[in-house]
Image (cartoon, rainbow, N blue to C red):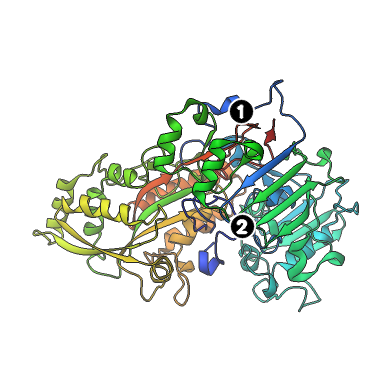
Amino acid sequence: MRRLRRPTSAISSRTAMSRRTAAASAALVVLAAGAAACAGPEDNKNKAGGDGKPQKGGTLTVLNSDPQSDFDPARLYTSGGGNVPSLVFRTLTTRNREDGADGAKVVPDLAESLGKPSEDATVWTYTLKKGLKFEDGTPVTTKDIKYGIERSFAAELSGGAPFLRDWLIGGDKYQGPYKDKKGLDSVETPDDRTIVFRLNKPVGDFDYVATQTSFAPVPKAKDKGTKYEEHPVSTGPYKVVKNTGDGERLQLERNPHWSADTDAERKAYPDRIDVRSGLNSSVINQRLSASQGADAAAVTTDTNLGPAELAKVSGDKKLAAQVGTGHFGYTNYLAFNPKVKPFDDPKVRQAIAYAVDRTSVVNAAGGSSLAEPATTFLPNQKSFGYTEFDHFPAGASGNPEKAKELLRAAGHKDGLTITLTHSNAKNFETSPEIATALQDALKKAGITVRLQGLEDNDYEDKVHDAKDEPGLFLAHWGADWPSGGPFLAPIFDGRQIVKDGYNFNSSFLDDKAVNQEIDEINKLTDHTAAAVRWGALDKKIGAKALTVPLFHPVYKRLYGKDVKNVVISDWTGVLDVSQASVK
């Protein structure tokens, strides 16, 4: 899961906590929905250079708010190979580097093909391509991938994705190669090009998991522990030449031993990549808008346009042509705790669902250009298994009369008073503005809403504490990869309820039929078939009124006037730096 904030990247390093601190998400992740992520109507003008083809050479500058800190494949929490990290770290698989829905597909990277699963999807085998090399010219072997995975278990290198710890046989007890010289028996390397993973449960999505940076090869002889991030050994088209201020400035130059013959995904047009971070979001947008000097060949992967900025840009035809539009699998919703009265009554939960005015919520979230109304928990993208439904049709502006009818049936003929918990942070997802919009809508149905605003850290701790979770609060969820599994399982699988740590199953749903269906879908390695069943499960769970989906975010991000070949996929929702060229 990804815990995302409005200004930051859909896919960035450490945008999620561990699975128990960001369940298995972000994540995460900062934002990080729509029918298809694609370039805006003017963006096709920026597909190529003046001669009709992307140009090689020059320097691409990346202007970001969040530093690219902990630049170590074991510590990065990225999916689909990340964005800037994927320029240095190649993995067994990666995302398809295409616009929109095509970009939500997983494809081979270091591996010759996608993984070969056993019949029950508990054993996965990959074969490496021939001719793979590190930046120093030494060959890449499966032993380097195994070692890279093993070091991601070390306590000194915490922060990365937690899935392998949960899923590899023996992973729950393994402490990394610095303490356990024996290694992980469940990762086998019978020869230099073959690697086998043995899992304790079926994982039909393992090809997606193999995009995580923990699958990047690390040569054991070059491992410097926590200092490895200063100069990690590259397998991608660029290598790190300087890392200043723990990722505040990251300077990359071409890796002479990378070959496009082994890498069909990364185009690597610029000669250099200069990542400058720790910048104020308004400053980033001002610099990209002005596009002066080096900023003319600059992009951002974590800074959105706000409503006021977007209105200004939209009124300028030239600037409007420099806006990329993206969608990422992410849902903002109202969460119920049925253990707290009156939310133990399904009729009360249904009444609130009918009373919600999604138009006012969307406006509070920045308007229809930045948010799309949601009635399903799954994002409205095919890869997730999106199935259209609306169990409690409230229309565009709510149905207070139907809400009142349900309240009367629940014994609240004079209405009721409830508390809504939210964050005081101006982070778009759980903001006071959205809470106020909901307060106003529910008032029309006779529901008085008291707002409980908390500082962001206090809010996160409270809403994820199974012992102290409020009855009603604003929540959000983002996917680690474009599939229904990492979306529905952490929120609705009863076996993922955490009683003494970060809990994300806020409704405490522990339905045997739901749990069993999650297990059955996880066995499927046919992603199309799995998507259909995830969509059906979303519809089944939705009828229980355990959440009220509110909206899916849309990302609007500027790029410099000299940036060409803009590609924005449904996997990340942000401009893909591996595809961009500069004039």
The answer to whether residue 561 is visible is yes
Binning the other alpha carbons within 10 Å of mark 1 as few (below 14), some (14 to 19) or many (20 upward) gives many
At which x and y percent is residue 536?
Answer: 43, 46
At which x and y percent is residue 95?
Answer: 65, 44
Question: At numbered mark 1, what does the secondary structure look like: helix, strand or loop?
Answer: helix
**247 and 382: which one is in front?**
247
Query: In the image, what residue occupies the spot 70% across and 54% down?
Result: 250
Spot the residue most to the right.
138
Binning the other alpha carbons within 10 Å of mark 2 as few (below 14), some (14 to 19) or many (20 upward) gives many
At which x and y percent is residue 480?
Answer: 56, 54
At which x and y percent is residue 172?
Answer: 64, 73
Residue 179 location, quadrant: bottom right
Q: Amino acid at mark 1?
A: Asn
Question: Would residue 263 be found to the left or right of residue 582 on screen?
Answer: right
Mark sitting on residue 46: 1
Q: Amino acid at mark 2?
A: Pro
Image quarter where the C terminus lies is top right
Residue 45 location, quadrant: top right
Query: In the image, what residue occupies the spot 46% across and 55% down?
Result: 477
Spot the residue most to the top.
51
Could you tell which of marks 1 and 2 lies nearer the N-terminus?
Answer: 1
**44 and 569: which one is in front?**
44
Spot the residue most to the left.
414
Question: Would residue 180 be found to the left or right of residue 463 on screen?
Answer: right
Query: In the image, what residue occupies the spot 62% across and 48% down?
Result: 525
Q: Which residue is mark 2?
A: 67
Query: In the image, what residue occupies the spot 26% across and 45% down?
Result: 357
Question: Would residue 254 be found to the left or right of residue 529 on screen?
Answer: right
The answer to whether residue 545 is visible is no
Question: At numbered mark 2, what does the secondary structure look like: helix, strand or loop?
Answer: loop
Question: Would residue 242 be found to the left or right of residue 336 on screen?
Answer: right
The residues tagged by marks 1 and 2 sit, at their Cα atoms, a distance apart of: 27 Å
